[in-house]
Image (cartoon, rainbow, N blue to C red):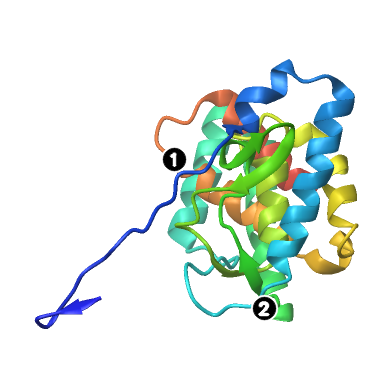
Amino acid sequence: VEQQDEWLSISVQQLVPGRPLAELAADLDARELERLLLDCGERLARIHGVKTDRGVAHEPSRRSEELVARAVDTAERALGGEAASIVRYGADRLADLLASRGSPETTLVHGDFLPPNILIDNGEVASVIDWEFAGPGSPAFALARWAHSPRNLLREQMDALRQGYARIADPVAAADGWVGAFAIDYSLAELNRKELPRDRIRRSVERIAGYC
């Protein structure tokens, strides 16, 4: 909103019922959790059915040599030379992919579609909250984030999410081969965090290896 030659930011919020899926998951039986994850996948596909060019853009990017060098060094210090080679190869693979394919097709992505932001009320997916990172991006960004974010304790249930997604659209076609690029990109950024625990360094290296 413009007021007296200044731009003011306004946040409009609405109170919605429910508890985060992340809080409820441990108390749900396997069948109920699977049902909710199927519904989450369907909701995710419906979000990706919307086109937008506004908001926070989510694209894989060719990382600077300085950032790659720090990631390689982090892996080598924690896990040794083989891990460092994997990180270097992953960065090169990402750069080659971006050079050959350009940027992926974009739709609306939530930006943080994870169980802490999915509210459950009366046994149903009631709403998805925290849209401040929403904007144009590949559906692969959301699928990679669900599969690899350390904030997602339900990442092992990826198959149920994909099955729910498939009610609306083919998740493989929607991702268009870009999940690996986002996973590598995320891992390189992760390896640049300060004082990263050794287990998270290992997961980042394993993640890169899985897509190389």
Q: Is residue 212 visible in the rendered structure shown here? A: no
In terms of sequence position, does the residue under pointer 2 or pointer 1 come before the other?
2
Residue at image coords 48%, 62%: 65
Q: Element under label 2?
A: helix
**Quarter placement of the N terminus:** bottom left
| Disc 1 packing (10 Å; few <14; some 14–19; many ≥20) | few
Residue at image coords 59%, 51%: 186
Q: Horizontal placement of 28 versus 131: left or right?
A: right
Judge by depth and name the residue closer to the eye, 48 or 96: 48
Q: Element under label 1?
A: loop
Name the residue that disc number 2 marks.
99
Residue at image coords 47%, 31%: 196
| Disc 2 packing (10 Å; few <14; some 14–19; many ≥20) | few
Q: Quadrant of residue 210?
A: top right
Q: Amino acid at mark 2?
A: Ala
Residue at image coords 66%, 39%: 205
The spot of residue 74 in percent (x, y) is 51, 38
Residue extending furthest top? 27
Judge by depth and name the residue closer to the eye, 128 or 111: 128
Q: Is residue 15 visible in the rendered structure shown here? A: yes
The spot of residue 2 in percent (x, y) is 20, 79
Question: In the rendering, which numbered label is found on residue 193?
Answer: 1
